[in-house]
Image: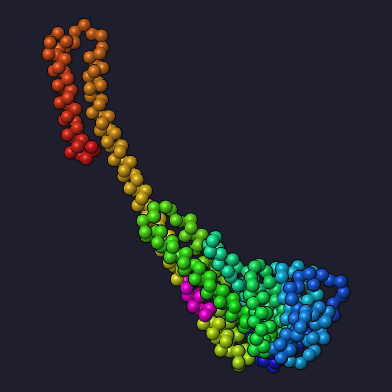
Amino acid sequence: MRASAFRRLARFLDPTPSAAVAPVTPEPGRPAEHAVVDCGRYVDGVRKPGRIPLRDTPRALRERHGFVWIGLRDPTAEQFEEVAERFALPPLAVADAVRAHQRPKLEQYGEILFAIVKPVRYVDADEVVDVAELALFVGPRFVVIVRHGETDVPARARALADGDPEVSRHGPIGVLHRIMDLAVDGYTDAIDGIDENIDDIESQVFGGDEHDHAERIYKLKREVLEFRRAVKPLAGAVVKLSDTSDAPLRPYFRDVHDHLMRVADAIDNYDSLLTDVLQADLAQVSVRQNRTAMRQNEDMRRISAWAAIALLPTAVAGLYGMNFERIPGASSPYGFWMVLGVLAALCVVLWALFRRNDWL
């Protein structure tokens, strides 16, 4: 990208002008190369063969119509120090890039843009949204990408730039667009995966499956909220770029913003839907528990009724089993049968009463 375009973008994002800082020559012997994944040089949109060492980047920066693309993975503060000094990167942004766990954002430091982008991938087997983080330093003649976590977005962006000169012809700001575009494409893929799992959960909850799905629903809801934190703050950064970037790239950033808003709307819908499904599942669990309690109460009534019926002959039999000399009816030849008849009649009466009250 031309330096004039960066100056226009700087005036919009940062009203206080600041002069470009010349790269500093670092001390030798620093372990930056251990964290560098790639260091390439592009001229007129075409990558020059091979990988250049960091010590040769100042010479590459002096070339017209070219820029340097450096990628690092999980660098420590010591490893990133050499890169920060060579490209005069702002200390506050460097600290954010090394520490990671930042919100998506876009900041302007003189002629250097600092952006945080969070690509995601949806692990369907675990129903987990795996969030990575990219910190991008975009200058007039360089782009430095710091990666934290597992993501193939920088590698895919480099492959596209190496295979098609039009991708990298717009310079570092074009690389920023490609990174954001690929990240948003990953958001769309994650949305498709979440949609399939929500359909599956809905089928189980409303399809007669009596298992408790609350834990699965709650876990997926947490993943959707984590997904939202990666998507929502990026919208403001893309809007700024769509309004202030070089004219040929504005429609492309607007297209990224349009796709991003669709993803954001889908996330909001899924969050609300999961809340409704969770409430429905809890309601069904409550209904099943009430049914179980009712069945238990019915069983207890039946047991109590039969126990009451059995108690009467047991009590009479126990009374007649006592060793008394005179027992009513003992001297009569029909006494035994009369007692049995009375007991049977009383048991039938109790059974009829319990039956009428739906205890049996």
**Picture quarter containing residue 214?**
bottom left
Vertical placement of residue 342 versus 123, above or below: above
Residue 320 percent across, percent down from the top left: 22, 14
Q: Which quadrant of the figure contains the N terminus?
A: bottom right
Does residue 161 appear to the left or right of 27 in the view shown?
left
Figure quadrant of the C terminus? top left
Is residue 261 highlighted in magenta? Answer: yes
At x 87%, y 74%, the residue is: 28
Residue 42 image position (x, y, % from top left): 73, 86
In the shown orientation, is residue 287 left or right of residue 29? left
Horizontally, residue 343 falls left or right of residue 4, namely left
Q: Relative to residue 8, is residue 305 depicted above or below?
A: above
Determine if residue 17 is in view: no
The image shows a total of numbered marks equal to 0
Is residue 342 or residue 42 the one in the foreground?
42
Q: Predominant secondary structure in magenta?
A: helix
Magenta-drawn segment: 259-268
**Residue 39 appears in the rendering:** yes
> Residue 43, position in %: x, y?
74, 89
The residue lying at 16 percent from left, 12 percent from top is 328
- Along the line of sight, the residue nearer the viewer: 226 or 185: 185
- The part of the image, by quadrant, that contains residue 323 is top left
Residue sitting at 69 percent across and 85 percent down? 172
Q: Report x, y in % for residue 126.
A: 54, 60
Report the coloring of the rendering. Answer: rainbow
Identify the residue shown where x is 50% and y is 68%: 193
Q: Choose between 323 and 50: the one closer to the eye.
A: 50
